[in-house]
Image (cartoon, helix red, strand yellow):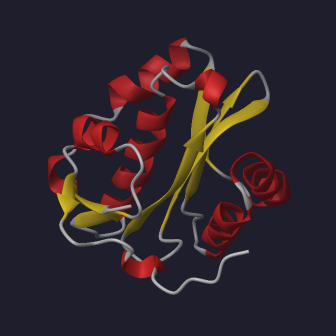
């Protein structure tokens, strides 16, 4: 899978994405330390051990570089950055039944705006699956010959 590059100085407005989530009854926010075990366990059960490992490391940052989406008291999505490398967005995921509500875009934008606040000018989205989503949501562009990128030689179970 290829990597993509995002110009953080040309992001779409965050507020409409957050407003759509609020209207849908979805709370999108930064994770809190006391819920680390809940979030990391949920990511492991829902998306697998490698993503849980990446999610867990984001709790070492202050503040954590991970955001979650919660609907009716249940996790429905998450997004992280600065986990595999500095300047990288991901991993991220929204459960299948909750897709199509703009939750993924809201989580993406929260992370990217947080990256701007931390001084980044660009973000790399590593190992992209849905190229069209990132291109449409934030104008991300494919980085040619970027596969396997930073994941080269990674141990897998």
Q: Residue at x 28, y 69 (%)?
A: 120
Instruction: Answer with the quarter of the image where residue 12 lies.
Output: top left
Q: In this figure, what is the number of numbered marks?
A: 0
Image spot of residue 142 (x, y percent): 21, 57
Instruction: Answer with the quarter of the image where residue 77 lies.
Output: top right
Q: Tell me, yes or no, if residue 12 can be seen here.
A: no
Q: Tell me, yes or no, if residue 104 can be seen here.
A: yes
Image spot of residue 103 (x, y percent): 50, 30
Q: The N terminus appears in which quarter of the rendering?
A: bottom left
Q: Residue at x 83, y 51 (%)?
A: 38
Instruction: Answer with the quarter of the image where residue 88 lies.
Output: bottom left
- Nearest to the observer: residue 97 or residue 33: 97
In the rendered structure, the answer to whether residue 43 lies left or right of residue 105 reads: right
- Nearest to the observer: residue 96 or residue 124: 96
For this orientation, the residue located farthest to the bottom is 153
From what the image shows, is residue 109 above or below residue 101? below
In the rendered structure, the answer to whether residue 12 lies left or right of residue 72 reads: left
In the rendered structure, the answer to whether residue 84 lies left or right of residue 68 reads: left
Image spot of residue 129 (x, y percent): 42, 49
Q: Residue at x 48, y 59 (%)?
A: 90
Q: The C terminus appears in which quarter of the rendering?
A: bottom right
Image spot of residue 35 (x, y percent): 81, 53
In the rendered structure, the answer to whether residue 146 lies left or right of residue 110 reads: left
């Amino acid at each position: 899978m290829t990597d993509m590059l995002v110009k953080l100085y040309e992001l779409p407005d965050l507020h409409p994405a957050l407003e759509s989530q609020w209207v849908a009854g979805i709370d999108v926010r930064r994770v809190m330390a006391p819920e680390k075990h809940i979030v990391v366990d949920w990511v492991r059960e829902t998306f697998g051990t490698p993503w849980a490992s990446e999610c867990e490391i984001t709790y070492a940052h202050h503040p954590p570089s991970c955001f979650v989406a919660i609907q009716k008291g249940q996790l429905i999505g998450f997004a992280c950055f600065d986990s595999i490398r500095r300047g990288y967005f991901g991993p991220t995921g929204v459960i299948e039944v909750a897709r199509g509500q703009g939750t993924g875009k809201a989580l993406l934008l929260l992370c990217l705006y947080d990256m701007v606040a931390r001084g980044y000018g660009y973000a790399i989205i590593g190992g992209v699956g849905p190229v069209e989503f990132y291109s449409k949501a934030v104008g991300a562009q494919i980085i040619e010959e970027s596969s396997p990128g930073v994941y080269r030689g990674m141990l897998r179970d």
